[in-house]
Image (tube, helix red, strand yellow):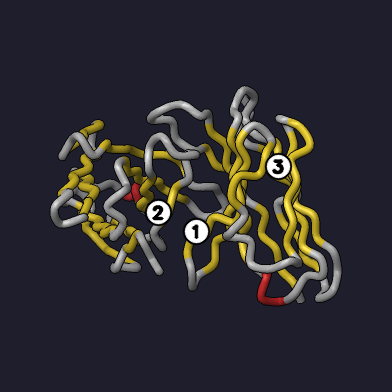
């Protein structure tokens, strides 16, 4: 039972354009969400997070949107750069628990120069 | 800080052999997580510890897998006996038990079981 789903295994975007990565979840107990970026031969690194009390969080070129009613979140990267090419993992957790995260299967983003 | 340290970075072994993966969490972090990444299943949580105590090992695939955390600065994940289907990248991550804190991942160990 996949509680966090990333239905697009890959995405290609032209440099300078917007990249939109999507994530859906089924567990209504999740109240915080994170995006991680992973380069080959490295561990995932934290990118941005959002609490369920917000619907948007922005950090430079990265913005995460949360739609609780749809149980959907998205990561927008504007403008996309070739260095953004990586696998992006969506993760969700329940605050106040033991901090366990559930990860999606990842989306490979390729930004074309 | 050096970040989460994992060893070895690569391990190639033969079916039936024992494999031990090692992890040193970030100093001061009191939660430690072991994950496995495969093409089919993405990132799966195997087990996690809070203050050196295993909290949830429901993700451990079977009895061949075991994990220990004898102290706050060291953990091991052991597979005995190993099988080809155990081939994957194994990540260790650590975090603090603080609201809003994130997990910091090590570089991973790529395991190949022939």
Say the numbered circle drawn on residue B21: none
The image quarter containing residue B114 is: bottom right
The reply to the same-chain question for discs 2 and 3 is no
Is B28 placed left or right of A93 in the picture? right
Residue at 42 percent across and 55 percent down: it is: A103
Discs 3 and 1 share one subunit: yes
**Residue assigned mark 1:** B43
Q: Nearer the viewer, residue B50 or A8?
A: B50
In the rendered image, which quarter is residue A3 located in? bottom left
For the residues labelled 2 and 3, the Cα–Cα distance comes to: 24 Å
At 75% across and 46% down in the image, what residue appears?
Answer: B68
Q: Which mark lies nearer to you, 2 or 3?
A: 3
Q: Would you place residue B41 above or below residue A49 in this image?
A: below
Q: Is residue A60 left or right of residue A6?
A: left
Residue A105 image position (x, y, % from top left): 41, 63
Q: Residue at x 74, y 75 (%)?
A: B83
Q: Position of residue B59 (x, y in %)?
A: 58, 60
Residue at the disc numbered 2: A86
Q: Do tags 2 and 1 sit on the same chain?
A: no
Which residue corresponds to mark 3?
B23
Q: Which of marks 3 and 1 is nearer the N terminus?
A: 3
């Amino acid at each position: 039972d996949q509680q966090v789903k990333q239905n697009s295994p890959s995405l290609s975007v032209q440099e300078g354009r917007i990249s939109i990565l999507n994530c859906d979840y089924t567990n209504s107990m999740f109240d915080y969400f994170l995006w991680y970026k992973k380069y080959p031969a490295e561990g995932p690194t934290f990118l941005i997070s959002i609490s369920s009390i917000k619907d948007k969080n922005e950090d430079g070129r990265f913005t995460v949107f949360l739609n609780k009613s749809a149980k959907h979140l998205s990561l927008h990267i504007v403008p996309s750069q070739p260095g953004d090419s990586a696998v992006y993992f969506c993760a969700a957790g329940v605050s106040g628990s033991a901090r366990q995260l559930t990860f999606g299967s990842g989306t490979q983003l390729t930004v074309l120069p | 800080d050096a970040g989460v340290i994992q060893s070895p970075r690569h391990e190639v072994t033969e079916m039936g052999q024992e494999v031990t993966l090692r992890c040193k969490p970030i100093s001061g972090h009191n939660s430690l997580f072991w994950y496995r990444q495969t093409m089919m299943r993405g990132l799966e949580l195997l087990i996690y510890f809070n203050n050196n105590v295993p909290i949830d090992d429901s993700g451990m695939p079977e009895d061949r897998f075991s994990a220990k955390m004898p102290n706050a600065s060291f953990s091991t994940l052991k597979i005995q006996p190993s099988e080809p289907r155990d081939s994957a990248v194994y990540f260790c991550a650590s975090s603090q038990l603080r609201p809003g804190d994130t997990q910091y991942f090590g570089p991973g160990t790529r395991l190949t079981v022939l």
